[in-house]
Amino acid sequence: MIANFYHVFSNNWRTLFNPNLHIANNVRIKKSIIKKNGKVILQSGCRLGPYAIISPSNGNIIVGEGTSINAFSMLYGPGNIIIGNNVSIAPRCSLMAFNHNFLDVDKPIKTQGVNFKGIEIGDDVWIGNGVTVLDGVKIARGCVIGAGSVVTKSIPEYSIAFGNPCKVVRSRTNVADLK
């Protein structure tokens, strides 16, 4: 489905259009692409910015209440992507819930298939501009991920993390660290 307008969807319209696409009330979509090759659930109050792409690729992508996915971000989820409530995903982020198999040097990589574990993002997470989150990662509740980071390993709750590879630099729970 391509939505070339800013619109609040109603429940009746979306169910008739595609049974694998579940859009709650008060979801705002602006010029975004939702591919119909898997299941997508957008819970109440979600916002998709311009040119965001959601492609479940035979997996499931579930986006929690009040979550914002900003312009030019891509969620590609054959391994499933589950995003909690009130998550802010800045522009140009990529969540890639799969990896290519590549161990057989006698075959082209693109013919060796893929493997996947999935990605989970907890509630109240802020993912900065241009962040890449790779397959198998869990970002726990309350984390802040700095712009441009490449998240290759799971991040514990209330962490502030950044870099390539992304590393925890401090905790949000220790107020003295934040001053």
Image: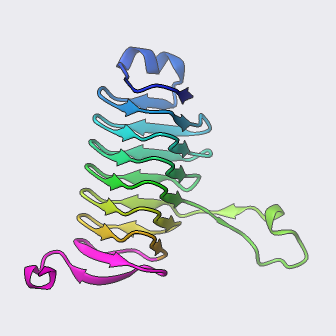
Is 81 a magenta residue? no
From the viewer's perspective, is 157 left or right of 62?
A: left
65, above or below 118, in the image: above
Question: In this orientation, which residue lies closer to the viewer: 161 or 16?
Answer: 161
- Looking at the image, which residue sits at the far right? 106
Q: Residue shown at 52%/41% (left/top)?
A: 51
* Above or below for 69 versus 171: above
Q: Residue at x 48, y 58 (%)?
A: 93
Q: Which residues are magenta?
A: 153-179
Relative depth, front residue between 153 and 31: 31
Residue at 46% x, 25% y is: 5
Whole-percent x, y for residue 101 in the image: 72, 70
Q: Nearer the viewer, residue 135 or 53?
A: 53
**Residue 78 place in picture, x, y as percent:** 59, 52
**Quarter location, residue 25:** top left
Q: Residue 107, percent across and down?
A: 88, 71
Q: Residue at x 32, y 82 (%)?
A: 168
Q: Which quarter of the rendered picture does the C terminus lie within?
A: bottom left
Q: Is residue 32 above or below residue 7?
A: below
